Amino acid sequence: MARKSAEVQETSSQDLINDLISGTQFEFIGQNGQEGKGSLSDKPKVETPVIALNDLLGGGLPLGCMIEVFGPNASGKSSMMYETLGNFQKQYPNGVAFIIDSESSTDDSRLRQLGVDPMRAPRMGAATLEDGFEQINKIMNKMVNNESYKGFPVFILWDTIASCPTRAQLKSGEMYAGGMAERARILKTALMTIFPLIEKQNVLLVLLNQVMAEIGGWRPGVTSAGGNALTKVA
């Protein structure tokens, strides 16, 4: 009798859940017989040159995500991600890759050595953080508002956000122009605006960053130049 009551309660709970999510955007992972629907494991992947990393991620970096890659200067961040970009072009011949080159460090010969076809990877040099994010926003809004872009694979690589000044810094020439936490505020606002658009598309946004030594404390440590504003949002 107790078992029967439990079954009735379980059924009633499921009915209640179905009623609550009716008319909303909530849905169950694996709903309608589609295993993994809505989960990271179900998203298309881009292979990196690191086999162990691909295995850990279930095949590579997933589209529909925003990723930060950071490390010390000359540690191979750019080379690794440009090679990943080359893999993207091979895996998705109909896709397009965008390069935001804040350090003016790319050239045709280097890109080709890393497996990238420069003619399928439009490039821009971002003068400021705001400029870079505005251009990404334009691309994302075009994709969201045009049904023909649904499922279209896109790879956006920004190398690096650490080297971009803010508009206030560029205009005044002063390092601390714009007030305290100016960069953090811009990063947080921009990423919170872009991420909901990226999640709905097959877009992979990779932000390359450098590291900063943490000052103070009882042990040495490093953190990305984006700080908590970038880490917690991405």
Image: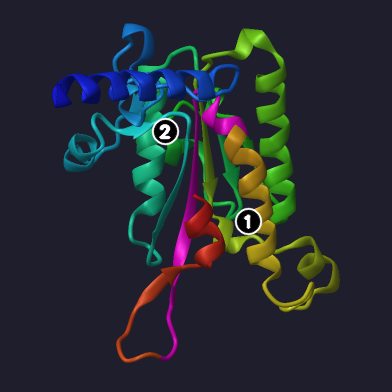
| 19, 120: nearer the viewer | 19
Q: Please name the colour scheme applied to the rendered image.
A: rainbow
Dot 2, how many residues are within 10 Å of its Cα: few (below 14), some (14-19), or many (20+)?
A: many
Residue 61 percent location from the top left of the image: 35, 35
Q: Is residue 7 left or right of residue 147?
A: left
Residue 205 within the magenta-colored segment of the rendering: yes
Q: Residue at x 22, y 42 (%)?
A: 53
Q: Is residue 73 above or below residue 155?
A: below
Q: Residue at x 37, y 47 (%)?
A: 79
Q: Is residue 49 left or right of residue 158?
A: left
Residue corresponding to mark 1: 188
Q: Quadrant of residue 221?
A: bottom left
Residue 204 within the magenta-colored segment of the rendering: yes
Q: Is residue 62 above or below residue 33?
A: below
Answer yes or no: is residue 226 visible: no
Q: From the image, which quarter does the N terminus lie in?
A: top left
Q: Element at badge 1?
A: helix
Q: Is residue 172 left or right of residue 206?
A: right
Q: Residue at x 37, y 67 (%)?
A: 72
Circles 2 and 1, Cβ within 8 Å, touching? The answer is no
Residue 109 percent location from the top left of the image: 45, 37
Residue 150 percent location from the top left of the image: 57, 13
Q: Is residue 45 above or below residue 126?
A: above
Dot 1, how many residues are within 10 Å of its Cα: few (below 14), some (14-19), or many (20+)?
A: some
Q: Amino acid at mark 1?
A: Lys
Residue corresponding to mark 2: 85
Residue range in magenta is 197-216
Q: Residue at x 46, y 18 (%)?
A: 18
